Amino acid sequence: MKQKVRPRTKPPEVRREEIMDAAQRLFLKQGVGLTTVDHVASGADVAKGTVYLHFASKQELLAALGERFAAKHLAHIRAAIAAKSEQDWPGKLAAWAEACAGFYLDSIELHDMLFHEARSPTRQGLVDNVITDHLEALLKAGHAAAAWSVDDARFTAVWLFSGMHGIVDDAYLREKRIARSHLIDKLQRICFRTVGWPSDDNLDSREAGASRRAGKPGNPTSGKR
């Protein structure tokens, strides 16, 4: 019986990911400025030429890491929204706020390394932003379904995303230990008010629905007269 021969080289996409993983670890540990391509090659256990085979420069490697971060962020948001029913527009908008802010909170050091330490923020970052593009599409879809009225979906998407970013940054810098659920609750209420919904009514309705699904008593008008 012949033994299987292990391939000497890994598929290019696997090798590329391993190089990116090694670079990310090193950038976080010792900083972007102090990390060289030689360090990355050693960390990925490849020759320096192999790194350059996949990335023309350290800046190109950083750009690829930024794109991967954004893709994972978007996938996290999409999954949260997809878990809601087709007509649950309050749930979808609340899911966007929770998933968007939650991912950022969980990855804030990586985000800052990729988008602040590694390069200066630019206005182009607001234009070429897959998270903003996705939120714009969600707002347009809700408007088309008469779930809310948003005159300018692009303006609103940029405003909400930028606001979320600023609120999380401010809380992180001021407190370090963030009251996560309280922060996300506030963000959800801001999102609801922005599209013209009474935030308390929508959040109470969602909580009551969750209680009913869990077999617990729930009253969306509890405590109101």
Image: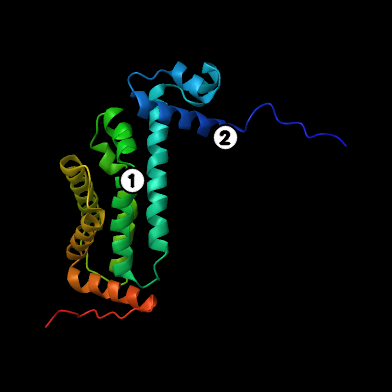
> Quarter holding the N terminus?
top right
Q: Quarter-wise, where is residue 209 in the image?
A: bottom left
Q: Residue at left 33%, top 58%?
A: 137
In the picture of the structure, the residue carrying the numbered disc 1 is 106
Question: Does residue 24 appear left or right of residue 6 in this picture?
Answer: left
Question: Does residue 217 appear left or right of residue 5 in this picture?
Answer: left
> What amino acid is at disc 2?
Val
Residue 7 placement (x, y as % from top left): 70, 30
Report, in whole angstroms, how far the alpha carbon at label 1 lies from the one at label 2.
Answer: 25 Å
Q: Mark 1 or mark 2, which has the lower sequence index?
A: 2
In the picture of the structure, the residue carrying the numbered disc 2 is 14
Residue 170 placement (x, y as % from top left): 17, 44
Identify whether 114 is placed above or below 216: above
Q: Residue at left 29%, top 63%?
A: 93
Q: Residue at left 41%, top 17%?
A: 36
Q: Secondary structure at mark 2?
A: helix
